[in-house]
Amino acid sequence: MLYPIFLNLKGRPVLVVGAGSVALGKIQVLLSCGGKVRVIAPYAVSEVRELSDRGELEYAARKFDSSDVAGMALVIAATSDAQVNEAVMRCCHASGVWVNVVDDPPRCDFYVPSLVNRGRLHLAISTEGASPAFARRLRRELDHWLHESLDEYVELLDAARKRIRQRVSDRAARRSANEAILNCEARTSLEHGDMEGARAAIERVLARIEQKRAEA
C-alpha cells in the first residue's frame, strides 16, 4: 500500500527532465502548485519556451547532468529516451530525491494521481500506475457527478469549523458539532444557488450549539 499525501511545493525547487508535450502537462501542474520549476532538455516545445520567456520557469537547453538533481524537492523524468530516464532515476536515488519516471511505474517513487478539484476540495485517484486511463475515466465521472458549488460549501465548512474550535473545547463535542453542520441543509441550498440560505442553515446549527453550551 502507498502512503497518500498532498505536497506543498510552493516556492520549492522541482526539476522536469524533458520538454515535450508529456513534460509540458507535468510542468503546468507543478507551476499551478507554486513550484519553482526548472526544465532540462536539449529541445523544447514552443509552450515550454514561452513559459521560460515569461519568467515562469527556468529552462536549460542541454542534456541532463547528475548534478541537476541536487537540492530538488522532487524530480520528474519525462523524456522519450529510456536510458536518460534510467539515469535520472539512479541519480535521484543516490541523492535521496523523490523521482517519477513517466509511464514507468516500477521506476517511480511516487505516482501523480488524476485529480478532481472544487476549490480547496481535492479528490485524488490512483491505480498505482496499473491503469492511468481508468484513473482518468473515474476522474471524468466524478467531475461530472460532483456539484460545482462544493468549493463554496468547503469554505463555509471551514469558517464554521474555526468558530466551533474557538467556542468548544471538548474534542468529542467538536466532532459532534461538525457532524451537525454536515447534516444540515446548507449543501442542498448551495446546489440550488442559495448562498444566503446555506449560511442561514449553518448559523441555525451554531446557534443551537451556543444555546446548549449556555444551558450546560
Image (cartoon, rainbow, N blue to C red):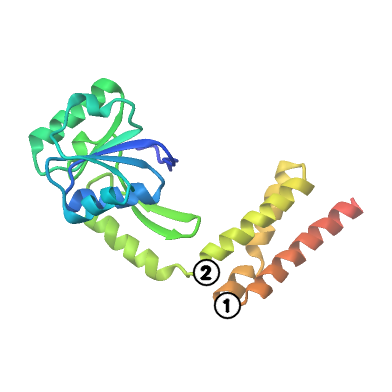
Instruction: State which quadrant residue 209 falls in.
Output: bottom right
Mark 1 belongs to which amino acid?
Gly
Which residue is pictured at 32% across the width and 61% down the height?
Answer: 138
Which residue is pictured at 40% across the width and 48% down the height?
Answer: 33
Question: Could you tell me which secondary element the residue under label 1 belongs to?
Answer: loop
Percent x, y for residue 109?
28, 34
Q: Is residue 179 left or right of residue 129?
A: right
Query: Which one is earlier in the sequence, the residue at label 1 or at label 2?
Result: 2
Mark 2 belongs to which amino acid?
Ser
- Judge by depth and name the residue closer to the eye, 120 or 171: 120
Pointers 1 and 2 in contact (C-beta within 8 Å): yes
- Judge by depth and name the residue closer to the eye, 216 or 60: 60
Percent x, y for residue 148?
47, 69
Question: Dot 1, how many residues are within 10 Å of its Cα: few (below 14), some (14-19), or many (20+)?
Answer: few
Which residue is pictured at 59% across the width and 69% down the height?
Answer: 187
Which residue is pictured at 35% across the width and 37% down the height?
Answer: 2
Mark 1 lies on residue: 193
Mark 2 lies on residue: 149
Q: Is residue 22 left or right of residue 167?
A: left
Instruction: State which quadrant residue 197 falls in.
Output: bottom right
How far apart are the two marked residues, 1 and 2, measured between alpha carbons?
8 Å
